[in-house]
Image (spheres, grey):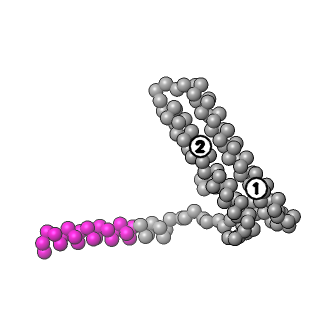
Amino acid sequence: MTQRWKYIIGFSVLLNVLLIGVLIGKATSPAFPRFPPPSIFNKDSELRVIMEKSMHENRPIDLQIMETRHKINTLLSAKEIDHAQFEKLTTELTNLHNQKFKNITEALFQTASKLSLEKRQQLVEELEHLPPPPGFK
């Protein structure tokens, strides 16, 4: 057997071992459960369109939040911490979170205002029983 074939077979065995490891790991590891959205948000629902539009409008705010967090982390890891700059950045981060929350609640209000009383009660019931986000117990 030539040296080339030894390398090809060795590489093939290595890839197969990695593939088997990935498959076994995927089969045995607990996956995050996928919870469905509230049932009143069916695929063609106008309500779903309103909430998705709200999420799309919040994307620039999400990017600003990430950027501000990065600035705060950079400031905290610096040799000297500028207290005034830290206060300014944390205030900015708080304002961004408040704006995002305001946008979400406004979209929720728009959504709820288009529903009948029965559907609003169903929405409230389903929102109360949503699971916590990943990482929270």
- Is 124 left, or right, of 44 in this rendering? right
Q: Which quadrant does the N terminus fall into?
A: bottom left
Main SS, magenta region, reads helix
Q: Quadrant of residue 48?
A: bottom right
Q: Is residue 64 visible?
A: yes
Query: Which secondary structure, mark 2?
Result: helix
Query: Which secondary structure, mark 1?
Result: helix
Viewer-nearest residue: 20 or 44: 44
Numbered mark located on residue 108 in the image: 1
Q: Quadrant of residue 36?
A: bottom right
Q: Which residue is mark 2?
A: 65
Q: What x and y, as percent, mark residue 80?
A: 49, 25
- The kind of residue tagged 2 is Ile
**Label 2 vs label 1: CA separation?**
21 Å
Vertical arrangement, residue 89 with respect to residue 50, above or below: above
User: Magenta stretch containing residue 67, yes or no?
Assistant: no
Vertical arrangement, residue 28 with respect to residue 71, above or below: below
The boundaries of the magenta stretch are: 1-21
Q: What x and y, as percent, mark residue 74?
A: 49, 35
- Residue that appears at 45% across and 66% down: 25
